[in-house]
């Protein structure tokens, strides 16, 4: 039997850990005067923090560890994919706004 509360809890914990780490990295880069976001550093930090989050949650689970972590990984992947798709749609919005606006 799957404990869906535990799966959702672990998904949220891992995503919050990644969000806080990325937020801190970008904040530090901005205060240091960086003109661009350090994309490579963000990617490496996301992989590192995601791995740490999965390791911590994997150790905490006592029963059906592999199945639980597999469900958590799938959930994190789904949420990340939705985030990417949403950001792609938002980035395309400026290109489509002239189609829906009235000419002056």
Image (cartoon, rainbow, N blue to C red):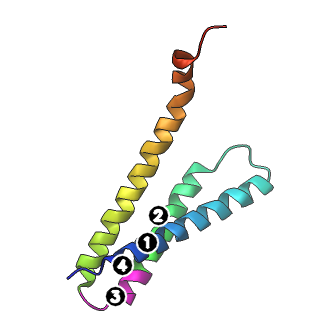
Q: Nearer the viewer, mark 3 or mark 2?
A: 3
Pointers 2 and 4 in contact (CB under 8 A)? no
Could you give the CA–CA distance between mark 4 and mark 1, rounded to whole angstroms?
Answer: 21 Å
Q: Nearer the viewer, mark 2 or mark 4?
A: 4
Q: Which residue in the structure is indicated by mark 1?
A: 51
Q: Earlier in the sequence, mark 1 or mark 3?
A: 1
Q: Nearer the viewer, mark 3 or mark 4?
A: 4
- Which element carries disc 2, helix, strand or loop? helix
- Which element carries disc 1, helix, strand or loop? helix
Per the image, is 57 magenta?
yes
Q: Which residue in the structure is indicated by mark 4?
A: 5
Pointers 3 and 4 in contact (CB under 8 A)? no
Give the magenta part as a residue range: 56-63
Q: Nearer the viewer, mark 1 or mark 3?
A: 3
Q: Earlier in the sequence, mark 3 or mark 2?
A: 2
Q: Which mark is residue 61?
A: 3
Q: Which mark is residue 47?
A: 2
């Amino acid at each position: 039997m799957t404990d869906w509360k535990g799966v959702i809890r672990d998904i949220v914990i891992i995503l919050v850990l990644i969000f806080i780490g990325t937020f801190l990295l970008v904040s530090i880069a901005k205060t240091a005067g960086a003109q661009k976001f350090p994309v490579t550093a963000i990617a490496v930090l996301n992989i590192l923090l995601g791995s740490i989050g999965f390791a911590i949650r994997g150790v905490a689970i006592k029963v059906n560890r592999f199945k639980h972590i597999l469900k958590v990984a799938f959930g994190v992947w789904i949420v990340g994919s939705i985030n990417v798709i949403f950001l792609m749609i938002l980035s395309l919005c400026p290109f489509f706004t002239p189609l829906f606006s009235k000419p002056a």
